[in-house]
Amino acid sequence: MTNKNPMRLPPLRVLRIRQPNRPEPNPCMTVMSSVLACWASAGYHGRGCTTVEQALRACMDAPIAPKKGSNTINYHLARFSKRLIAQGRK
């Protein structure tokens, strides 16, 4: 059951990846939502919320990771697109 005709992709006008520099989610956001949920259920001075509050404090006091450089994938795709699209038209 081998297919003699290889699968062909439709021609592309532009090679591009959408949102390559999507920001990473904040790791402290989940801990913050836990603190808010604890305060909503037990009150602002709830005694059961101290461990979650300490976890949030530790997360917020942790050093910030250095920012990554911007992703250059679309730049390189644009450079090679002329060669790839020109070969497909022949």
Image (cartoon, rainbow, N blue to C red):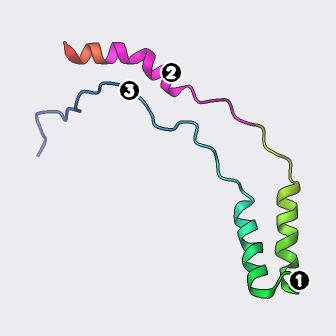
Provide residue 60's location: percent of width, then percent of height.
Answer: 84, 57
Q: Secondary structure at mark 1?
A: loop
Percent from the top left, x then y, of residue 35?
A: 77, 73
The first of marks 1 and 3 along the sequence is 3
Amino acid type for the residue under numbered disc 1: His
Question: Against 71, is 45 above or below?
Answer: below
Q: Nearer the viewer, mark 1 or mark 2?
A: 1
**Mark number, residue 45:** 1
Instruction: Locate residue 29 relative to residue 53 in the image: left or right.
Output: left
Write the residue at 29% across / 27% down: 12
Label 2 sits on what residue type? Answer: Tyr
Q: Which residue is mark 2?
A: 75
Measured in 3D between alpha carbons, the distance from the residue under mark 1 to the one under mark 2, in whole angstroms, is 53 Å
How packed is label 2: few (under 14 Cα within 10 Å), some, or many (20 or more)?
few
**Residue sitting nearer the eye, 19 or 10:** 19
Say which quarter of the image contains residue 51: bottom right
Q: Which residues are magenta?
A: 67-84
* Residue beneath disc 3: 15
Disc 3 residue type (three-letter) = Leu
- Where does residue 30 sit, x and y in percent of width and height? 70, 65
* Disc 3: CA contacts within 10 A as few (<14), some (14-19) or many (>=20): some
